[in-house]
């Protein structure tokens, strides 16, 4: 039996097409997967800090599946401030598979496609507390003047506050609320997970650090001997900086005299006014009222009851000023934020789906 030239040509064409299609499938499949890319940005706002912090800041950027398939589609952005007590800003991606969690949330309709940015906001000693400091650098300016414009210039974002949210965990939750308070024109939606620093706790805060260590330090490494002292040193570097007072570059608001703790009232007032979020409510009430959405949560099982007490008081004070918000005390383990049963999946992402704008608007405000 012989095969005609027409039939032979048809078979060759069919085989060639099938081979080309099979070769193309892996390329196409790879191109529509989500991506997590690493970027670095040198900050002029941090470059002249006194504490030796590297001004080259690293970040992870989550891009949803299909990001490269269309040059026209643009995406809302969630800025994420991780818990600074984890190993690094990328801990949730390296150890909790945040990428797969976000992929699943999008696939199951929990939230539409979005970009997420997780950036390293830590100093050499710990958290920057996201503020401008003459000791550690201008971290607030880094976020507002450098990072957000960089992301909008280099990725397909919806560059407006309605499509820009901020979330954080623990100290990162503090930063999320603080940025929402001071920059509602940049971040329209705020979700803080178990924030600290919202207000006064049960204990006297000045009784937590060891003042004998602070009074006799020879280097910044000395404060690492005690966890509470280290944390409070980062707080003082952020809110009571003294660039002419090495090696810690802080003003000491208290001193230990025998069994008595002597507190400098003026420095304590300055610290409280600059640090506690509840003291900032009167100044930024109108800003908070302008947010598209504002929520924070905390677990009643936190071993440090100061955090529970402060968050309960914080929501009451917000109510006193007529600030619409959501506040939830839940009965669960501290740090149970990840996985399909974690609050990032069950609460934070649905919150942003509800409050962020996912489509572009024209000059008349039409979508």
Image (cartoon, helix red, strand yellow):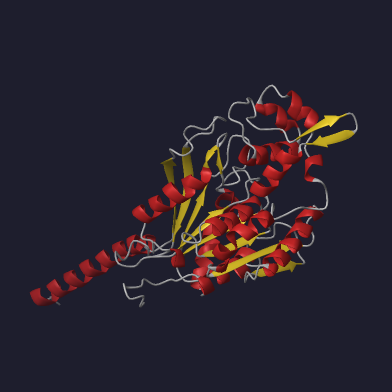
Q: Which of 241 and 36 is in front in this view?
A: 241
Residue 160 location (% of width, % of height): 41, 63
Residue visible at 42% across and 62% down in the picture: 33
Q: Residue furthest front?
A: 266
Q: Is residue 10 above or below residue 249?
A: below
> Would you say residue 195 is visible in this rendering?
no
Quarter holding the C terminus is: bottom left
Q: Residue furthest left?
A: 5
Q: In this view, does 132 lie above or below 155?
A: above
295 vs 59, left or right, is right
Q: Residue furthest top?
A: 218
Quarter holding the N terminus is: bottom left
> Would you say residue 218 is visible in this rendering?
yes
50 vs 318, left or right, is left
Q: Which of 255 and 38 is in front in this view?
A: 255
Determine the image quadrant of residue 333: bottom right
Q: Nearer the viewer, residue 145 or 86?
A: 145
Determine the image quadrant of residue 316: bottom right
Residue 114 location (% of width, % of height): 45, 65
Q: Is residue 26 above or below residue 322?
A: above
Residue 128 location (% of width, % of height): 59, 42
Q: Nearer the viewer, residue 343 or 296?
A: 296
Residue 36 location (% of width, % of height): 46, 54
257 vs 344, left or right, is right
């Amino acid at each position: 039996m012989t095969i005609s030239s027409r039939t032979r040509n048809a078979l060759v064409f069919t085989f060639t097409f099938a081979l080309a299609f099979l070769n193309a499938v892996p390329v196409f499949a790879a191109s529509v997967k989500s991506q997590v890319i690493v970027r670095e940005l040198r900050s002029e706002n941090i470059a002249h800090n006194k504490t030796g912090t590297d001004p080259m800041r690293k970040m992870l950027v989550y891009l949803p599946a299909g990001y490269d398939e269309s040059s026209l589609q643009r995406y809302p952005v969630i800025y994420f401030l991780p818990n600074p007590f984890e190993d690094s800003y990328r801990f949730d991606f390296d150890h909790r598979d945040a990428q797969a969690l976000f992929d699943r949330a999008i696939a199951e309709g929990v939230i539409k496609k979005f970009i997420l940015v997780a950036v390293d906001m830590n100093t050499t000693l710990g958290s920057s507390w996201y503020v401008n400091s003459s000791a550690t650098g201008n971290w607030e300016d880094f976020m507002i003047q450098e990072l957000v414009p960089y992301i909008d210039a280099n990725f397909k974002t919806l560059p407006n506050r309605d499509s820009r949210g901020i979330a954080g965990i623990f100290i990162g939750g503090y930063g999320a609320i603080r940025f929402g308070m001071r920059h509602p024109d940049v971040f329209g939606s705020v979700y803080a997970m178990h924030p600290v620093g919202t207000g006064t706790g049960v204990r006297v805060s000045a009784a937590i650090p060891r003042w004998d260590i602070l009074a006799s330090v020879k280097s910044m490494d000395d404060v690492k001997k005690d966890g509470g002292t280290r944390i409070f040193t980062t707080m003082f570097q952020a809110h009571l900086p003294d660039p002419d007072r090495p090696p810690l570059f802080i003003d000491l608001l208290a001193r230990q005299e025998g069994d008595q703790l002597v507190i400098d009232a003026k420095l304590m007032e300055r610290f409280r006014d600059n640090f506690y979020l509840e003291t900032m409510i009167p100044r930024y009430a109108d800003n908070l009222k302008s947010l598209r959405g504002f929520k924070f949560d905390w677990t009643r099982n936190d071993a440090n009851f100061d955090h529970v007490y402060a968050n309960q008081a914080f929501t009451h004070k917000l109510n006193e000023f007529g600030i619409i918000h959501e506040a939830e005390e839940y009965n669960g383990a501290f740090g149970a934020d990840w996985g399909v049963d974690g609050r990032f999946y069950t609460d934070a992402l649905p919150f942003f789906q509800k409050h962020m704008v996912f489509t572009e608007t024209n000059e008349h405000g039409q979508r």
